[in-house]
Image (tube, grey):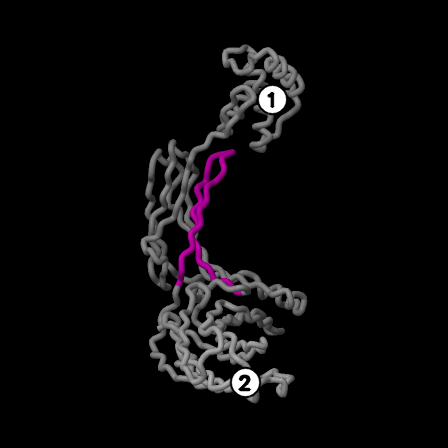
Amino acid sequence: MALSLQQATVEEQSCRSSGRLEDPSCSHWLCVSVVSVWQVMCFCGVRVAGCVSLVSVWQVVCLCGVRVAGDRWMVANMSVSVDIRLKRANKVYHEGEALSGVIVLQCKEPLPHHGILLTMEGLVNLQLSSKSVGVFEAFYNSVKPIPLLSSSIEVARSGKIPAGKTDIPFEFPLQAKGNKMLYETYHGVFVNIQYTLRCDVKRPLLSKDLSRTCEFIVHCQPQKAKVSPSPVSFSITPDTLQNNRERGALPKFLVRGRLDATSCVINQPLSGEVVVEHSDIPVKSIELQLVRVETCGCAEGYARDATEIQNIQIAEGDVCHGLSIPIYMVFPRLFTCPTLETTNFKVEFEVNIVIVLQDDHLITENFPLKLCRV
């Protein structure tokens, strides 16, 4: 017996008007469901000819995991969850260490699969700012993702996961690809260094594969040489300012201060002090601005962009003259890394001391920083 979609639609309307649609014992039930089955197969991506055999339709429905009743259909929900849990709570690893943990699968019913694959990847993603696009043709080759590591293991062969919770342990050696080295994890604007674990559960035909991604953090090996802090003193007056075209229009002021070090250990705060000795116009605010300077490019040229990471207000209002105001800034995790310079990109950092006067004059003093890990 075969019905076209048009004939099935007529049968459905007849049963709907007579109230027999909801009765599973109705002799028209199987025929009526063809319309819904047609919709289901379109939803599942099954291409159907104009005339459909009911037996074939029913086989397709069972294969797709679809339950049909009257004009209502429902995709069977396996309620499967996949999670990747690393043994280290902080997810921080160093090159040469073993990355270990478990894959946690939870399902209400047994889950058939065609293998479970775990992939570890490390990539440097470079992006050009809008002002640099089209400047150098060679840029387009140099901004391609740079692979640092790539490896995969099959943690489970084709089979069936039992109902309930299943833990699958794994262990990965954290080694760079070829002769490359692992850079520290860094989330920037134009430079992004990221390491991920991805678990893929391959499902049977017409079932969507399951995937889960987990990021872990790589820290570079601490340098053996000790960093000896060398304090940097500064004095800001109208005469010391650069890029000042209207020097005569500036009010008289004198700001002194000190940074305890410009070669900084990344897990220790930046510290120092600033003192407003005198100012003809009252001070409105004093701020500490941390800036990332990212450079992407090649031999033909470079695109250098500076963007703000964080801004901390250390004083508000007209501060007392001669009073020492402490400087204290913690370097944020992920958004900073040890100063890095490679063939295709550089990551550097600077700090700005910004003094805003009541008449909205902006006074800025810039200090390049070198970050390291010890």
Q: Residue 49 sits in which quadrant?
A: top right
Residue 214 lies within the magenta run: yes
Q: Can residue 304 be seen in this view?
A: yes
Q: Is mark 2 on a helix, strand or loop?
A: loop
Q: What element carries label 1?
A: helix
In x, y percent, where is residue 6? Answer: 67, 19
Q: Are dots 2 and 1 in contact, CB under 8 Å?
A: no
Q: Quadrant of the N terminus?
A: top right
In x, y percent, where is residue 178? Answer: 44, 63
Q: Mark 1 points at which residue?
A: 35
Residue range in magenta is 191-218
Q: Which of 207 and 286 is in front in this view?
A: 286
- Residue at position x 46%, y 70% in the image: 312
Q: How many labels does the image show?
A: 2
Q: Residue 53 sits in which quadrant?
A: top right
**Disc 2/disc 1 C-alpha distance (Å):** 84 Å
Q: Earlier in the sequence, mark 2 or mark 1?
A: 1
Q: Name the residue under label 2.
A: 280
Residue 76 lies within the magenta run: no
The kind of residue tagged 1 is Val
Residue 27 located left or right of residue 219? right
Residue 232 located left or right of residue 308? left
Residue 75 located left or right of residue 98? right
The kind of residue tagged 2 is Asp
